[in-house]
């Protein structure tokens, strides 16, 4: 699943390089190493071949890579073994590359790419699980598994302009059935190791799977090709063929997977955390490092979250009092705001359309302010959409997906509007700034258009950096005056800062302190007035995508600390645009490398 935070990099043979326009590869500077650029290109191509979905998402399933448009990535034992072998092979080549004589930029790129392979190798030591927003112990859940990701991918990401595209779509439908069978086999394998999702996760998964049990003509995958093939004048045959594949292959595979989910439900416990698994504590430590790119222990992350929450709550308290809201705790007063009818969109399709329209208006409004803070602007188009109703139950509350490299598909920001009451108006704008501009879409758009980055780095990502930047972007929107005439919007901004601090508390609480699902939900509701449904969905996400929720506030703290240090040392000479050039110009990096980048930039300003 290609999520809002990063591209899941994939692989091809060296011969496939011809399929990718030369200008998309990182061109070495005059003092750069052509040999290193060639190595990076080879690694990128190797990965592209292992994950055909990424080739499509990047718009690179063409020419020598055109065969990838008809394929899906593998999930069987052979595919997993091949992925582990490729990681080890790539890591060995990176570690053997001679560093003598490399430019500072080349050394940075080599360090970052090597870091990704080491981190991946650490995760691959565990012979169970899948991937959601980061390493997950569960191959199938409400957030993981082909049953929920592939239909959306085929509907919204697979291009359908020609007969060849439609034929490839049908081939991917057939591959979808095999992928389901392979993941069902992996579920059984993992259960043999004692790795079984909690009962409430299996209930969510089961409910989502049952919602897919509709006549073939009503499924997303069949309706999509029927509608789009007809629009292109390709005839009705594709709709009939798709319905046949759905009934004869996909539906039986889904039924078998649902049966396995129900069988596991009988063996599941209600314990939320992975502390209960034999390798659970070790997996959590690896996942926490993988997603945050820090070496902080769970106990240190927990304390950090508590300390940050206290400071942000004090700021919220002062602002609430300024609005005349003085009675009750911060959480109780924020909960009262959630119930304010003036802040609620109707829980209807029309009301949800109004919310999305407001979000797109905020996206357009902040774009006009960004030249005040940035020298470079991404040229891609961006828009806000609603999460498809069929996946609302298990989907994250909000997320974004990057544009294609060629810009033909815009960057997308999604809001989960299953219940409009979970998204009062005062909470929407700050999330637009986080997911869109100047957050993920801005940072990602700059990376994709950065000619100084090799392609392997343009399309890679680190949650600590990406989420840290996006949370910093929320702060920057406030500093740019986006709430000067919207005091309740500023409350929403700080409320979500508090939310990210509490994520550090809750995620570590679940997986190391043995917090229950209910205790974790209660913490969000009591501390920040969170809507119970929103809080439940978030907690359920952390149970599946372990550690990743901690990356937001940890990353934010690095960006703000670097800026505060620079302002203190440079005084009136501090240039915000130059600072942003420095921390964005190197592309996405682990947080410890970001610290080095910031310190080197500051030293150069002082010299």
Image (spheres, rainbow, N blue to C red):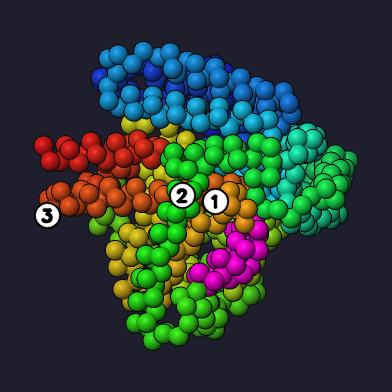
The residue under label 1 is: 508
Element type at mark 1: helix
Q: Is residue 310 magenta?
A: no
The residue under label 2 is: 301
Q: Nearer the viewer, mark 1 or mark 3?
A: 1
Q: Is residue 524 magenta?
A: yes
Element type at mark 3: helix
Report the quarter where the N terminus lies: top right
Image point (24%, 53%), residue name: 564
> What distance separates the C-alpha of mark 3 from that of mark 2?
34 Å
The location of residue 346, given as percent across then percent down, is 60, 78
Label 1: few (<14), some or many (≥20) within 10 Å?
A: many
The disc, 3 or 2, on the residue closer to the chain's N-terminal end is 2
Residue in the foreground of this view, choosing between 206 and 311: 311
The location of residue 165, given as percent across then percent down, is 67, 37
The residue under label 3 is: 572
Image point (35%, 70%), residue name: 315
Q: Which residues are magenta?
A: 516-540
Depicted 509 relative to depicted 64: above or below: below
Residue in the foreground of this view, choosing between 515 and 226: 515
Q: Is residue 364 left or right of residue 5?
A: left
Image marks 3 and 2: residues in contact by CB distance under 8 Å: no
Location of residue 203 by image quarter: bottom right
Depicted 19 relative to depicted 275: above or below: above
């Amino acid at each position: 699943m290609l999520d809002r935070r990063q591209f899941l990099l994939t692989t091809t043979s060296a011969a496939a390089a011809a399929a990718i326009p030369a200008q998309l590869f990182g061109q070495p500077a005059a003092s750069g190493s052509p040999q290193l650029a060639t190595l990076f290109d080879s690694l990128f191509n190797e990965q592209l071949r292992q994950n055909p979905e990424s080739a499509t998402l990047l718009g690179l399933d063409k020419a020598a890579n055109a065969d990838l448009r008809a394929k899906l990535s593998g999930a069987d034992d052979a595919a997993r073994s091949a992925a582990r072998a490729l990681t080890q092979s790539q890591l060995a080549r990176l570690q053997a590359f001679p560093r003598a004589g490399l430019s500072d930029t080349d050394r940075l790129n080599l360090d970052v790419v090597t870091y990704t392979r080491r981190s991946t190798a650490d995760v691959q030591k565990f012979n169970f699980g899948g991937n959601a927003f980061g390493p997950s112990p569960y191959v199938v859940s409400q957030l993981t598994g082909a049953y929920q990701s592939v239909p959306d991918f085929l509907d919204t990401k697979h291009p359908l302009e020609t007969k060849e595209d439609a034929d490839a779509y049908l081939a991917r439908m057939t591959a979808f059935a095999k992928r389901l069978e392979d993941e069902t086999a992996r579920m059984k394998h993992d259960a043999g190791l004692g790795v079984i999702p909690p009962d409430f996760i299996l209930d969510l998964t089961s409910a989502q799977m049952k919602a897919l049990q509709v006549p073939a003509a009503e499924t997303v995958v069949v309706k999509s090709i029927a509608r789009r093939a007809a629009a292109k004048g390709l005839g009705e045959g594709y709709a009939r063929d798709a319905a046949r594949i759905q009934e004869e292959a996909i539906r039986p595979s889904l039924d078998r997977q649902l049966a396995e989910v129900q069988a596991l439900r009988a063996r599941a416990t209600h314990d939320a955390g992975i502390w209960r698994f034999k390798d659970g504590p070790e997996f959590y430590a690896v996942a926490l490092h993988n997603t945050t790119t820090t070496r902080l222990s769970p106990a240190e992350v927990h304390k950090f979250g508590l300390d940050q929450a206290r400071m942000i709550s004090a700021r919220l308290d002062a602002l609430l009092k300024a609005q005349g809201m003085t009675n009750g705790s911060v959480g109780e007063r924020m909960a009262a705001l959630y119930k304010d009818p003036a802040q609620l969109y109707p829980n209807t399709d029309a009301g949800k359309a109004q919310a999305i329209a407001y979000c797109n208006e905020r996206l357009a409004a902040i774009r006009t302010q960004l030249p005040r803070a940035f020298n470079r602007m991404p040229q891609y188009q961006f828009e806000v959409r609603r999460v498809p109703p069929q996946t609302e139950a298990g989907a994250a509350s909000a997320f974004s997906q990057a544009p294609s490299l060629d810009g033909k598909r815009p960057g997308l920001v999604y809001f989960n509007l299953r219940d409009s009451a979970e998204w009062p108006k005062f909470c929407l704008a700050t999330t637009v700034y986080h997911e869109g501009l100047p957050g993920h879409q801005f940072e990602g758009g700059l990376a994709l258009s950065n000619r100084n980055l090799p392609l392997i780095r343009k399309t890679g990502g680190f949650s600590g950096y990406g989420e840290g930047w996006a949370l910093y972007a929320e702060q920057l929107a406030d500093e740019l005056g986006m709430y000067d005439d919207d005091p309740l919007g500023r409350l929403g901004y700080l409320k979500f800062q508090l939310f990210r601090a509490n994520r550090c508390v809750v995620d570590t609480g679940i997986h190391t302190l043995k917090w229950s699902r209910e205790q974790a939900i209660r913490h969000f509701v009591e501390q920040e007035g969170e809507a119970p449904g929103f809080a439940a969905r978030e907690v359920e996400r952390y149970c599946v995508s372990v550690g990743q929720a901690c990356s937001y506030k940890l990353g934010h703290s690095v960006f703000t600390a670097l800026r505060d240090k620079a302002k203190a040392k440079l005084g009136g000479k501090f240039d915000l645009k130059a600072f942003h050039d420095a921390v964005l110009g190197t592309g996405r990096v682990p947080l410890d490398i970001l610290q080095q980048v910031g310190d080197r930039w500051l030293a150069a300003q002082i010299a």
